[in-house]
Image (tube, helix red, strand yellow):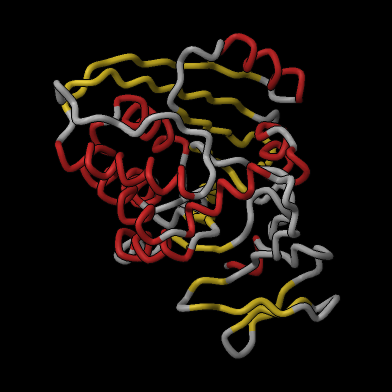
């Protein structure tokens, strides 16, 4: 149940459900349920110096969401790193297992997690973009264990500490005041819980990440890397160009737009980092 996992992000008070909204029993703050999605998003302070936040606004763009859905629909199940991640994640789940996915986007990975997880696993899929949620709802509609939640992953989070057995991060940040992702995840994980952190760039030394998470309090950690060729479709390249155009329009520091490829084969770089909290 949401009220067993979620709390008021402002005061951490318990939530009660009434009339298509959640209300904090302590401070009376109200959080609407919009088209089935509880909205715990707290207004982002207007800060003209926050370049990172301005760039993130691109994910509220409908063209960006459409392009990302096209790319993931054509590529997700061919990602070697993510295939390995799902094979590792599935056996760790059990009836009643709770997973937090940060930055669910179009919902492709939430669906995949639901397919490989044990029956009665609950997947709390977090994002802040309504355009992305439109696709996430489509891709997870037949997965009753997936719960879509709206919140800002870098603001006050609407979760009780030690609520999740697995925290799954892919490209999205987590933690208030630019807290380290691993440290923020450590607070949310139950004893014995697992952190999965996936990304694109194997050039970052996994050894230093392992050392950092062990110092942060995890009992073990490992890094996996992949570098492999993959044949993309022209539809993917076209969608990638749209993504770049929209990102530039929102101020992202991108150089030249992708050119028409001479070859549809490109090298893919993936990383997967896994760590376990003592328990």
Q: Position of residue 149 (x, y in %)?
A: 54, 63
* Vertical order, 204 against 242 (above or below): above
Q: Which residue is drawn at 53% across and 31% down?
A: 197
Q: Which residue is drawn at 54% across and 41% down?
A: 172
Left or right, residue 228 beside residue 217: left
Q: Which residue is drawn at 70% across and 55% down?
A: 157
State the image quarter where residue 274 is shown: top right
Q: Where is residue 13 in the image (x, y as percent from the top left)?
A: 81, 68
* Residue furthest bottom in the image: 19
Q: Position of residue 15 (x, y in %)?
A: 72, 74
Q: Residue at x 43, y 52 (%)?
A: 105
Left or right, residue 76 beside residue 163: left
* Vertical order, 42 against 84 (above or below): below
Q: Where is residue 257 in the image (x, y as percent from the top left)?
A: 34, 34
* Vertical order, 7 against 23 (above or below): above
Left or right, residue 202 beside residue 267: right
Foreground: 246 or 279?
246
Foreground: 122 or 49?
49
Image quarter of the C terminus: top right
Image quarter of the N terminus: bottom right
Foreground: 93 or 195?
195
Q: Total number of numbered labels?
A: 0
State the image quarter where residue 27 is shown: bottom right
């Amino acid at each position: 149940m949401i009220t067993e996992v979620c709390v008021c992000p402002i005061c951490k008070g318990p939530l009660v459900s009434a009339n298509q909204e959640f209300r904090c029993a302590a401070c009376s703050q109200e959080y609407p349920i919009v088209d089935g999605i509880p909205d715990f998003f707290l207004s982002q302070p207007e800060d003209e110096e926050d370049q990172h936040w301005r760039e993130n606004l691109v994910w509220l763009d409908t063209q960006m969401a459409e392009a990302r859905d096209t790319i993931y629909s054509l590529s997700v199940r061919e990602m070697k790193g993510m295939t390995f991640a799902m094979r590792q994640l599935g056996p760790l789940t059990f009836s009643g297992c709770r997973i937090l996915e940060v930055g669910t986007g179009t919902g492709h990975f939430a669906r995949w997690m639901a397919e490989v997880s044990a029956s009665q696993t609950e997947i709390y899929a977090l994002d802040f973009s309504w355009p992305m949620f439109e696709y996430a709802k489509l891709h997870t509609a037949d997965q009753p264990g997936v719960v879509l939640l709206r919140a800002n992953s870098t603001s006050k989070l609407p979760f009780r500490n030690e609520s999740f057995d697995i925290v799954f991060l892919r490209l999205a940040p987590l933690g208030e005041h630019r807290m380290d992702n691993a440290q923020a995840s450590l607070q949310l994980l139950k004893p014995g819980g697992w952190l999965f952190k996936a990304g694109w760039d194997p050039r970052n030394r996994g050894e230093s990440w392992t050392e950092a998470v062990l110092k942060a309090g995890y009992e073990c950690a490992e890094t996996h890397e992949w570098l492999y060729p993959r044949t993309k479709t022209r539809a993917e390249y076209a969608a990638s160009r749209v993504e770049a155009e929209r990102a530039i329009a929102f101020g992202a520091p991108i150089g030249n737009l992708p050119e028409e490829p001479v070859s549809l084969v490109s090298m893919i770089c993936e990383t997967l980092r896994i760590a376990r909290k003592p328990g």
